[in-house]
Image: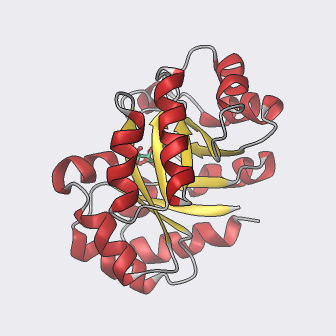
Amino acid sequence: MKLQAALDTLTLDECIKLLEQTQGSIDVVEVGTPFVIEQGMVPVRTFKEKFPNIEVLADAKIMDAGKYEADKCFDAGADIVTVLGVSNDATIKGVVESAKEHGRKVMVDMIEVKNLAERTKEVDQMGVDYICVHTAFDVQATGKDPLDDLKVVNSVIKNAKSAVAGGVKLATIDAIVEEGAGIIVVGGAICNAEDPSAMAKEIKKHLK
Ligand SMILES: O=C(CO)[C@H](O)[C@H](O)COP(=O)(O)O
């Protein structure tokens, strides 16, 4: 079970400080979509160069030109790239092809997938590494719990590992750990904490 820290709101220098202070706690560092929009692949290159032992995930949320866009992320040093589960199969397969060529991994982000069990079974046959349930930032205020979706995915998944994202925090981590997931993604609960590195270390203690 890995802890993925989703870095969306910190500056590059603050991210580097966090990763230096939490060596061993953060298994995967996510360059979040807002960070990619702001700085492109610069954080991906920087994290890979400075922290070669931490996996770097580029949250590109690909849904258009699968192989072409994934190539750009992997060439920049990403270990894992995200593609949206709502994308056409050809796009997901393109990202998988790119990952295989580069010897890297694919996470399918199931954000806003309506037929979750059915789509999970389909993408699970495409050679992806992680299938991630994700409650969108704009939906979290409705009280939607990603644990419900995680249970659905865990009940049908056969090849990939599950992952969970969207509003995960210290108060909800134990139930998620109990349910089980290959990767648990935590963004705001770490980045917006008074002491981000202390929070990351505390959350890591709850993982199996
Ligand atoms: O995908 C993301 C943006 O790229 C989010 O960072 C990720 O879902 C986790 O965010 P949070 O824990 O703050 O809800």
Q: Is residue 172 left or right of residue 195?
A: right
Say which residue appears at 31% left-offset and 54% top-offset: 8
Compared with residue 168, is residue 104 higher up or lower down, i.e. above or below?
A: below
| Residue, far front | 101
For the residue pair 108 and 151, the one nearer the viewer reads as: 108
Q: Nearer the viewer, residue 1 or 58?
A: 58
In percent of the image, x 80 and y 29: which residue is there? 156
Disc tally is: 0
* Residue 26 image offset from top left, x and y in percent: 53, 72
Q: Is residue 166 visible?
A: no
Point out the image quarter for the N terminus.
bottom right
For the C terminus, the quadrant is bottom right
Residue 6 or 124: which is nearer the viewer? 124
Q: Position of residue 82 (x, y in %)?
A: 46, 44
Looking at the picture, the colour scheme in use is secondary structure
| Image spot of residue 31 (x, y percent) | 36, 57
Corner quadrant of residue 130 = top right
For residue 118, say whether it is visible: yes
Direction from residue 109 to residue 157 in the image, left or right:
right
Question: In the displayed structure, would residue 92 be above or below residue 47?
Answer: above
Q: Quadrant of residue 48?
A: bottom left
Taking the view exactly as shown, the residue that stands out farthest to the left is: 38
Q: Is residue 3 left or right of residue 180?
A: left
Report the front residue among 158 and 178: 158
Q: Position of residue 11 (x, y in %)?
A: 21, 67
**Point 40% across, 85% down: residue:** 20
